[in-house]
Amino acid sequence: MNDNKQTQSPLVGLPSRKAYGKVIVELGHQNENIVALSADLAGSVNLADFAKEFPDRFINVGVAEQDLMGISAGLTLAGKIPYASTYAVFAALRAAEQVRTDIAYNNLPVRIVSSHGGITFDVAGATHQALEDIAFFRTIPGMAVFSPADAVETAAILRATVDVKGPVYIRLSRVAEKTVYTEEFDYKIGQPDLLIPGEDVLMITTGVEVGETVDAASLLKERGVNAGVLNISTIKPLDSKAVVDILKDYKTVMTIEQHNIINGLGSAIAEIIAEANLNLKFYRHGIMDIFTTSGPYKDLLSYYKLDPVGIQDTLLQVLDS
């Protein structure tokens, strides 16, 4: 865990998207150049308070995600720091060209803060589950990509990325994530956080799955498996050396993510393992290159084996293989 914790956070227990709504108001008071934009989703992405506090610094572009990104790019040329927010699936897919060409190609400091990442949109169905967003954003040159574990880490990431020179993507959830961090801390971009040291196996995870994986580690301990948990909330840029230093202590590693296993966290870790020539057993667990279905969130977690029991069972199968 981070060793620079300071005070108990009032954000504990909130969904990460609600933490965003509170922290962006805080940041808005600190920096008059911060502006917020939404594609007719201010309530859902929690920008309503910012709009009330700074009505002249909030823009609703309507149901036009491509315009959301294009306008945000233009605002940076006027010295503004835009926070563009919509659902993760729309940010990655509907506005892909504008993100790539208008924002990233010009290395503009737009902060794209999405909500409803992974399968957290539950009953909205396959079309609204964001399973490709990390894959898209991590392939864009110069784009920093973050996936916080909970509300407290969301606040830390938002504060740490205000002054990043280029574009930033932050992936948030619809649901209230399980609490991982309870106190405020200073976030170090790129640094992995070893939440639980383990001896037998290491589980590497990100975003909403961090809390689920921590609970899975407790279940595994009851089964006699001493499992470590590593939180990777900076998907890019990721400190490869720091990851390798941790991986060297393990013979079996499994990644867990609410994302297609192709080109998500699992792929990022696989690249590090391959380039460092590490000799270990490795498995990627997540959405197994399929389209998801709709249903209550807890049912989806169980169905896709992304709840603590599913993670435990999957890891035990990996260990037995």
Image (cartoon, rainbow, N blue to C red):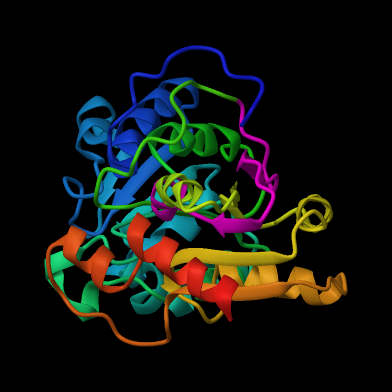
Q: Which percent across, then down, holds residue 48? A: 19, 37
Q: Residue at x 66, y 74 (%)?
A: 282
Q: Which percent across, then down, holds residue 198? A: 65, 46
Q: Residue at x 77, y 69 (%)?
A: 272
Extreme residue toward the right, this view? 277
Q: Which percent across, then down, holds residue 236? A: 65, 59
Q: Residue at x 61, y 26 (%)?
A: 186
Label count reads 0
- In front of the other: 199 or 209: 199
- In front of the other: 57 or 269: 269
Query: Can the viewer see residue 141 in this picture?
Result: no
- In front of the other: 299 or 314: 314
Q: Is residue 300 left or right of residue 67?
A: left
Q: Is residue 112 left or right of residue 227?
A: left
Write the start and end of the magenta stretch as one range: 186-214
Q: Is residue 148 above or below residue 101?
A: above
Extreme residue toward the bottom, this view? 290
- In front of the other: 207 or 195: 195
Q: Is residue 187 magenta?
A: yes
Identify the image quadrant of the N terminus.
Answer: top right
Q: Residue at x 34, y 34 (%)?
A: 19
Query: Can the viewer see residue 91 in this picture?
Result: yes
Q: Is residue 170 magenta?
A: no
Extreme residue toward the top, this view? 7
